[in-house]
Each structure stands twice: as C-alpha cells, then as structure tokens.
Amino acid sequence: MILAAQLSDTHFDLSARNTERVAAVMGYLAELPRRPDVILVTGDLTDSGKPEQYAEARLALRSDIPVHVLPGNHDDRATLRTEFLGEPATTTPVNSAHRVGPLTVLMLDSSIPGEPSGRLDEDTYDWLRAALADAPADGPILLALHHPPKPLFSPIVDVIALADPGRLAAVVAGDTRIVGTLTGHAHSPIATTFAGKPMITCPSTASVLGGTWEVTPPHRVMDYAPDPAIALHVIDESFGLTTHFRTVAMGGWLSEPPA
C-alpha cells in the first residue's frame, strides 16, 4: 500500500500557535509505526504570503519524508517559489507532478493572484494534459488542488470555490487512472464525490470552518478551539482510495481513558 498524508491551510502567520500545531502534526507523522510515503500540503501555507512566513513554513515542514506543496488563495506564487521551493521568482502557476511508487500525484495551482476564489487557467490545463500523457498507463493518479470544485454546503467557501468545475470534471471522469481529487480551502474534513470519484477535503491544522448549519456571520464563523487535524490516504494494491481523518491532540497521546 501507499500512505499519503495531507495537511492543508496551515496559515503560518509568525504566531507560535500555528507553528506549534504543525510541529505536533509533523511529530505525529514522524513517529508512526508505518510512516507516510509522502506529505501533501494543499495550499494556504501562509496567512498573507510574506517571505518570513514561508521561512517559518519551510522550517516547520522540514522532514525526511518528501513534502510537496501547492498554493492557496492566501499564498503568493513568486514568494512561495523563492522562499519555500528555492526557485526563481515567477507568477506562473505552481504546478508539479510527483511519483510515489506506482502512484502519480498531480498538484494543480488553482489560485488567482489577488483573489480569494479559484480557477485553473489555460496554462495549467496544458500542463495537466501533458502530465497525464506522461504518467504510467497502468498506475493510479491523484489530483490535488486548493479550491474545491463543487459546493460543500459552506456559506463562506462555496462563494469562493473553483470556477468552471465542469471542465475539470470532464478530465476526472475521462481518465480511468484518476482515483480521486484532494482539496483544501474549507477548513473541514469532508468526503464526497466529484465526477463520479472520491473527492476528499482536508481539514486545516489552524482552525475549523463551520457548515451552513453552524455559521452565523460575522461572529460565529471560524472555530480556533479544536486540535489540528489531517487526512491520511491509503492507496491499496487494487488502487482503491481509503481516507482516514485524524485529529492530533496538542496534549499528546493517552493510552488509557482519563479518570
């Protein structure tokens, strides 16, 4: 099997709080009896795209497990490239392909510079077509992007989700190798389907965003009380996708129920 850990919406903001929460998650992953083969971070690494926030993220996410990232609406493409990836500064989409055994992970940049909503531009679709053509014909593929391509019953996120989701749906439905789509942005663990296949939205390590039955703007929107949470994706020998959501307790592990 392949085990892929997904973190999202870490929102590094130079506060000790968000850094400590990611440190707890990375420590949890490092100490697992069966560690992940890869760690995927699906956007909003930083809260406002500042160089020092990416420096903070780079240190906190350092691991001997491969870590791959994509931007969210709070990120800055050029600064992410220079300060996190060590690449020249450009504002072109930060798309990337990664092989994990037989699995191919295609990380798609759905960010729109200066806007909260998402879109996959023509350059990204050109890149995606080429990446799919280059992927093994008999191996599974996971797509990952920040903005969910379907409504999630979140009054905050649904209005700033992915534009023109039908175009991506045609790609997902049309390629039998694609086993699922991973997203962030919603700050909530969500399992649904997209184009007839699993779509998993990863919770945030920083906070929880309520559904339409919970949110009463402007005072009851984001909940900062819960512990950080992640998603753990298993790709089995038949290339099926199974996801476990895990809360990482800031107070540590208890092997016995409290008195």
Image (tube, helix red, strand yellow):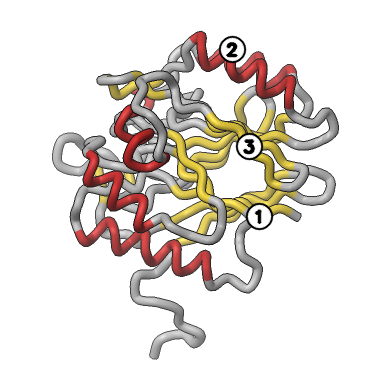
For the N terminus, which image quadrant? Answer: bottom right
Q: How far from the left and from the top, in percent, is residue 258?
A: 40, 86
Q: Is residue 56 above or below residue 86?
A: below
Q: In the drawing, what numbered circle is on residue 105?
A: 3
Q: How far from the left and from the top, in percent, is residue 69?
A: 46, 40
Disc 3 vs disc 1: Cβ atoms closer than 8 Å? no
At horizontal 43% and vertical 57% (from top left) the residue drawn is 62
Q: Secondary structure at mark 1?
A: strand
Q: Is residue 212 above or below residue 22?
A: above
Q: Is residue 39 left or right of residue 146?
A: right
Q: In the drawing, what numbered circle is on residue 3?
A: 1
User: Which mark sits nearer the N-terminus, 3 or 1?
Assistant: 1
Which residue occupies the foreground of this view, 126 or 164?
Answer: 126
Q: How far from the left and from the top, in percent, is residue 98?
A: 63, 38
Which residue occupies the foreground of this view, 9 or 65?
Answer: 65
Q: How far from the left and from the top, in percent, is residue 227?
A: 35, 62
Residue designated by label 2: 126
Q: Label 3, label 1: how many angstroms apart (C-alpha)?
A: 12 Å
> Which amino acid is tagged 3?
Val
Please identify the quarter of the rendering in which residue 251 is found: bottom left
Of all residues, the one furthest to the bottom in this rendering is 259
Which residue occupies the foreground of this view, 99 or 22?
Answer: 99
> Which amino acid is tagged 1?
Leu
Q: Does residue 93 appear in the picture of this structure?
A: yes
Q: Secondary structure at mark 3?
A: strand
User: Which mark sits nearer the N-terminus, 2 or 1?
Assistant: 1
